[in-house]
Amino acid sequence: MIIEPRMRGFICLTAHPEGCEQNVKNQIAYIQSKGAISGAKKVLVIGASTGFGLASRITSAFGSDAATIGVFFEKPPLEGKTASPGWYNSAAFEKEAHKAGLYAKSINGDAFSNEIKRETLDLIKADLGQVDLVIYSLASPVRTNPNTGILHRSVLKPIGQTFTNKTVDFHTGNVSEVSIAPANEEDIANTVAVMGGEDWKMWMDALKAENLLAEGATTVAYSYIGPSLTEAVYRKGTIGRAKDDLEATAFTITDSLKDLGGKAYVSVNKALVTQASSAIPVIPLYISLLYKIMKAEGIHEGCIEQIQRLFKDRLYSGSDVPTDEKGRIRIDDWEMRDDVQAKVAQLWLEATTETLPAIGDLAGYKNDFLNLFGFAFEGVDYEADTSELVGIESIK
Ligand code: NAD
Ligand code: NA
């Protein structure tokens, strides 16, 4: 069938298999163009199908010839209905990895559940013995705690007072004011339960209990800080509480890995267009201004450039891993540069529906958003008939 983007709110209901394949191939080519990284050889990526997790899997496989197991939660295709993009990304990833002679298997299901953890532990045991790197890159609006059975829903709200600021509908370019009422204690606890560190710790405890972590194993989870402009809704809001919890969990996990000489890190990454970030009010306007400036300065990066730099210059540079005063790896360093932030703050004041097309990179935002679903890639014939029924080689 001919597959076109079908937008509804912050999501696109369709995904293009060949476009997703092109996306994966482009990321692989980027990693290969940057040369080898002496990184981990057996890698588990939790949240491996899109965004930073997919980039981490590609960087491990094609930068360090690593065997990878990817865990994700994606919709397979049905006759006449496309899969979710992470499905097609993972199908393409496995195809390319297998062609290159690399081990790659995937598990599709709820990573928060005991069942998917069990399946993953068994697969590591059977095929890899142990892993030496665990990337934790889940972004989810909900989590069922496997011990209590309680379903937690995360919210994106400020804490303490109503937050009012500008936002943009990136589909229409309309800039308007948005007001978000503050969270209550239950909202905060639920958001921490979904996006905090509890599940990361559960994964690491389970892996360690069954001796599936190699000597010196490393684990990395991803966080965000951002500027004062977005602070009320992001870092000082409910999601920020979850990130505080995630960052604190890194220390708890490091303690638990002492006897193995292992270490847990949080890497603070740059703001990027992903399915997760597009749903946060205010952030898309911030990103469209940020992109404009970072592109003009020649310091713009996407997920793959960010993760290549994380692996090459931070985690596996051959020297100590540089961290900030809170023990975090910072690859948001270029985003947070004073000159970049001063320019964004100025443009923020000027941003209206009328000015944004010129002062912001709305076109770049939209293009990146379409790219998430496999659309708007050069070299893909979107007029051609294509089959939606693409399988992932390791998934029966
Ligand atoms: P994303 O939506 O692109 O990826 C999320 C991944 O999690 C996908 O592989 C998805 O399949 C998987 N997933 C979701 N729920 C799952 C479940 N229940 N079981 C198994 N897999 C599940 O998100 P992203 O933007 O790459 O975010 C990854 C991490 O990076 C998050 O912690 C996010 O906060 C952080 N981060 C994002 C940004 C940004 O601007 N996008 C910036 C800094 C840090
Ligand atoms: Na991810």
Image: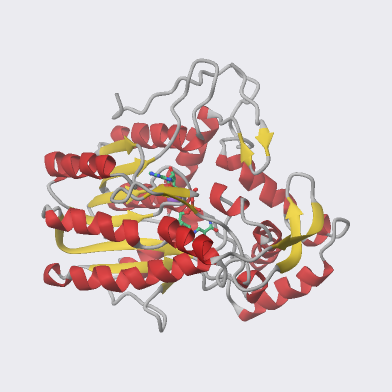
- Name the spot of residue 35 as percent of width and height, x first: 37, 56
Left or right of 293 in this view: 100: left
Instruction: Name the quarter where the N terminus is drawn.
Output: top right
Where residue 220 sits: x, y (%)?
34, 62
Return the residue nearer the eye: 241 or 272: 241
Report x, y in % for residue 91.
39, 31
Q: Is residue 247 above or below residue 213?
A: below
* Quadrant in which residue 283 is drawn: bottom right
Q: Is residue 377 visible in this depiction of the protein? A: yes
Q: Is residue 129 left or right of residue 169?
A: left
Residue for point 40% across, 39% down:
73
Q: Give above or below for 99 relative to 361.
A: above
Number of callouts in the render?
Answer: 0
Name the one closer to the observer, 319 or 184.
184
100 lies left or right of 388: left
At a point 62% along the width and 40% down the height, the residue shown is 11
| Residue at the right extreme, as displayed | 354
Which x, y percent locates residue 65? 27, 48
The residue under the point 48% across, 59% down is: 191
Vertical position of residue 366 compared to residue 282: above or below = above
Image quadrant in which you'd find residue 374: top right
- Looking at the image, which is closer to me, 211 or 335? 211
Q: Is residue 248 above or below residue 151?
A: below
